[in-house]
Image (cartoon, rainbow, N blue to C red):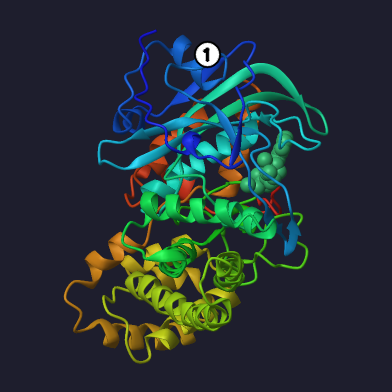
């Protein structure tokens, strides 16, 4: 084999029931749909032929140095605790140290059953695999912390959902796959030794400056307080912010029913199962705090004086609300060309968002149009817009280079749901051109290339995707 992956595994050496060794199920007829060359190079992978890559990233060929395993975790799903989840359709091949010296996980998702599959088949179908590939890479290009996509492989077998669908595997690269739910499972079981091992491992791997469980909690809170406002700045709705989908390293993980908003609406929900709007656009900061409260609860048992720790952790959770608000202000101020938000800037932002919401303005296009002064087309209340615009212009008069700040904060292009849907439909009939084109366009989301004008257009009535479904 000429494909070499320089594995350097550490999680597989943890003792205490953190995982089950589990080989991937071989794809019967693996066909390489995509391989991310730039990411592969960053990970130090020397690649061989497409056939070889397809065999490896379709699970048919376990490469030298891999120690495939499925991780154990638990989690709150829509607020209800599920004591045992775990990788039900994923296996971690192993870890590499990337060209920046950072440890990264390489995981196959959709590669068959594991001890944690419960009733599931462990498989994925083509649609969610391509969606994850496109959207996670788009998030990365937008500058938002995220897991990455290294490869997509069609397995050549059918998976059965409501109908028979083509099976596929996505290879996900993450800072790690440790989640809030990884801590929850050991805490809930009262396995304090494992909880301590996991805490020490996580600190060493992700937050070496953090001291003890409290330092870890603060570091994770800080990372989440940066992540969620970044989502909001591009109109992203994760859709399933369960504690098992809340990653400790602070990357966006698990692109299931996620979606980018077209028309701005603060309460927007896409996921068909999110009936109460728990994971709506505007609820995401509060849910991040809720998730951190679950991490805090899990870590309390490791503290020498749990009662005192409860009080301290509670104070930290309250402070997180302010941290999220401050970061949100920074993100949206930058969208208006303001470097350091102050005074009434929160109102200035809120006023614009209210005008946008009233008009059903396209989130991405309105902010992008502000860069060249044409946003008036996006907002119906023209009188109010002119007043707002004057106020805004006065506010940025003394900013050094608002245009440059805005250009970096307002993408021209996001992965629009209707384009993702069209891409999936095309792929199902064997046409992967839209998939490749989306990847090319979204790699440079701040550029305004006329070649991709069609991808910037909001959906017309017939194209609107009203709801999304979990990525199983
Ligand atoms: P997710 O909605 O992707 O966060 O998944 C929630 C849980 O369900 C995780 O433990 C997954 O591993 C598991 N799961 C989702 N789909 C499948 C499947 N097709 N087969 C087995 N387990 C699955
Ligand atoms: Mg998940």
Asked if disc 1 is less than 8 Å from ligand 1, the answer is no
Residue 429 falls in image quadrant: top right
Q: In the figure, 28 relative to 116: above or below?
A: above
Please tell me which residue is depicted at 50% across the width and 84% down the height of the picture.
Answer: 315
Residue 445 locus on image (x, y percent): 37, 49
Please tell me which residue is depicted at 18% across the width and 71% down the height of the picture.
Answer: 401
Give the quarter of the figure containing the N terminus: top left
Residue 471 locus on image (x, y percent): 67, 42
Residue labelled with disc 1: 61
Question: Is residue 459 in view?
Answer: no
Q: In the figure, 254 relative to 370: above or below?
A: above
Q: Is residue 279 left or right of residue 144?
A: right
Of 73 and 414, the residue lying toward us: 73
Please tell me which residue is depicted at 51% across the width and 70% down the height of the picture.
Answer: 303
Q: Residues within 10 Å of mark 1 (few under 14, many from 20)?
A: some
Question: Is residue 287 in view?
Answer: yes
Residue 86 falls in image quadrant: top right
């Amino acid at each position: 084999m000429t494909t070499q992956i320089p594995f350097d595994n550490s999680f597989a050496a943890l003792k205490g029931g953190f995982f089950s060794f589990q080989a991937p199920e071989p794809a019967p007829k693996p066909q390489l749909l995509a391989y991310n060359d730039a990411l592969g190079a960053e990970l130090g992978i020397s690649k061989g032929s497409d056939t070889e890559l397809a065999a490896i990233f379709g699970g048919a060929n376990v490469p030298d140095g891999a120690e495939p395993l499925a991780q154990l975790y638990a989690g709150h799903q829509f607020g209800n605790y599920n004591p045992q989840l775990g990788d039900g359709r994923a296996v971690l091949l192993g870890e590499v140290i990337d060209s920046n010296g950072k440890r990264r996980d390489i995981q196959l998702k959709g590669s068959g059953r594991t001890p944690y599959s419960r009733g599931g088949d462990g498989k994925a179908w083509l649609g969610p695999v391509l969606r994850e590939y496109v959207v996670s890479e788009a998030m990365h290009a937008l500058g938002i912390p995220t897991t990455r996509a290294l490869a997509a492989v069609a397995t050549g077998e059918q998976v059965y959902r409501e109908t028979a669908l083509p099976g596929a595997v996505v290879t996900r690269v993450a800072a790690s796959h440790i989640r809030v739910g990884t801590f929850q499972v050991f805490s809930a079981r009262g396995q304090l030794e494992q909880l301590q091992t996991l805490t020490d491992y996580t600190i060493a791997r992700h937050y070496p400056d953090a001291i003890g469980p409290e330092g870890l909690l603060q570091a994770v809170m800080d990372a989440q307080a940066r992540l969620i406002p970044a989502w909001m700045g591009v109109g992203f709705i994760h859709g399933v912010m369960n504690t098992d989908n809340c990653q400790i390293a602070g990357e966006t993980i698990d692109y299931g029913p996620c979606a980018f908003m077209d028309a701005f609406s603060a309460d927007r929900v896409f996921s068909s199962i999110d009936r109460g709007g728990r994971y709506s656009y505007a609820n995401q900061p509060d849910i991040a705090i809720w998730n951190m409260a679950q991490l805090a609860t899990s870590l309390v048992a490791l503290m020498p004086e749990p009662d005192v720790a409860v009080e301290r952790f509670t104070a930290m959770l309250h402070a997180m609300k302010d941290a999220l608000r401050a970061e949100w202000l920074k993100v949206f101020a930058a969208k208006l060309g303001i470097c350091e938000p102050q005074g009434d800037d929160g109102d200035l932002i809120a006023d614009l968002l209210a005008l946008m919401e009233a008009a059903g303005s396209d989130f991405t296009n309105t902010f992008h149009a502000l860069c060249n002064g044409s946003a008036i087309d996006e907002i119906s209340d023209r009188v109010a817009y002119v007043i707002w615009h004057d106020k805004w212009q006065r506010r940025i008069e003394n900013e050094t280079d608002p245009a440059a700040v805005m250009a970096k904060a307002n993408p021209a292009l996001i992965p629009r749901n209707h384009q993702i849907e069209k891409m999936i439909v095309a792929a199902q009939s064997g046409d992967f051109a839209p998939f490749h084109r989306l990847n090319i366009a979204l790699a440079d989301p701040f550029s305004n290339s006329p070649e991709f004008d069609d991808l910037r257009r909001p959906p017309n009535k017939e194209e609107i995707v009203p709801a999304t479904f979990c990525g199983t």
